[in-house]
Image (cartoon, grey):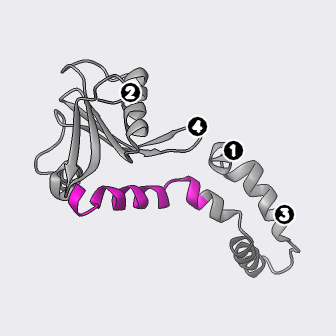
């Protein structure tokens, strides 16, 4: 029971709450209000992970109990369309298995996804060390051109990197 209502499953591993599972009817499209319900359950329990499923689609969210509460979709898996011989599909299913939770593979997967998201390289492109390296390479290619790091920053900001990447 969570604040007068019930989540469908609360999974404990080694005696402590590991994640919650909110189950909807098979074939029912998972919508934003279902996500909100699952995230609210997890936040009220102080749980970092919640799964939302309709039996075919499995979504795993990481919860950050901030003000406001944030959630990040880490896994979105359609069991009805996976290829049984595809290594990437098998690894995704493995993230949902007990061993995946016990060995913290899901957290490692989320960290790797976050490090390789478009926002990380976008932010790194605008740092002084990378701008200086770009400036040196441009000067090496065109020795007669006088260029400054701020010029490169301006071009990256206006013409190369999408605004949503820089602001994300």
**Residue depth check, mark 1 versus mark 3: number of the one nearer the observer:** 1
Alpha-carbon distance for marks 2 and 3? Answer: 55 Å
At x 24%, y 22%, the residue is: 24
Q: For mark 1, what is the residue?
A: 163
Name the quarter where the N terminus is drawn: top left
Residue 28 relative to residue 140: left or right: left
Instruction: Specify which label sits upstream in the sequence, 1 or 3.
Output: 3
At x 27%, y 48%, the residue is: 17
- Contact, mark 1 vs mark 4 (Cβ under 8 Å): no
Callout 2: few (<14), some (14-19), or many (20+) C-alpha neighbours within 10 Å?
Answer: few
**Residue depth check, mark 1 versus mark 4: number of the one nearer the observer:** 4
Q: Residue 68: which numbered mark, if any? A: 4
Alpha-carbon distance for marks 4 and 3? Answer: 37 Å
State the image coordinates of residue 95 (x, y, percent, origin top left): 23, 53
Alpha-carbon distance for marks 1 and 3? Answer: 17 Å
Instruction: Specify which label sits upstream in the sequence, 2 or 3.
Output: 2
Callout 4: few (<14), some (14-19), or many (20+) C-alpha neighbours within 10 Å?
Answer: few
Q: Which residues are magenta?
A: 101-121
Callout 1: few (<14), some (14-19), or many (20+) C-alpha neighbours within 10 Å?
Answer: few
Q: For mark 3, what is the residue?
A: 151
């Amino acid at each position: 029971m969570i604040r007068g209502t019930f989540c469908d499953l609360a999974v404990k591993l080694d005696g402590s709450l590991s994640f919650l599972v909110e189950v909807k009817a098979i074939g029912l499209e998972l919508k934003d209000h279902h996500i909100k319900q699952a995230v609210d359950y997890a936040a009220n329990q102080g749980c970092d992970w919640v799964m939302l499923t309709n039996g075919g689609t499995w979504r795993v969210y990481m919860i950050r109990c901030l003000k406001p509460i944030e959630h990040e979709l880490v896994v979105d898996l359609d069991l009805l369309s996976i290829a049984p011989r595809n290594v990437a599909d098998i690894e995704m299913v493995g993230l949902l298995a007990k061993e995946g939770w016990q060995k913290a593979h899901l957290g490692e997967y989320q960290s790797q996804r976050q490090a390789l998201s478009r926002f990380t390289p976008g932010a790194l492109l605008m740092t002084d060390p990378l701008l200086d390296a770009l400036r040196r390479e441009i000067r090496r290619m065109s020795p007669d051109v006088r260029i400054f790091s701020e010029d490169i920053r301006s071009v990256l900001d206006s013409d190369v990197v999408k605004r949503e990447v820089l602001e994300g």
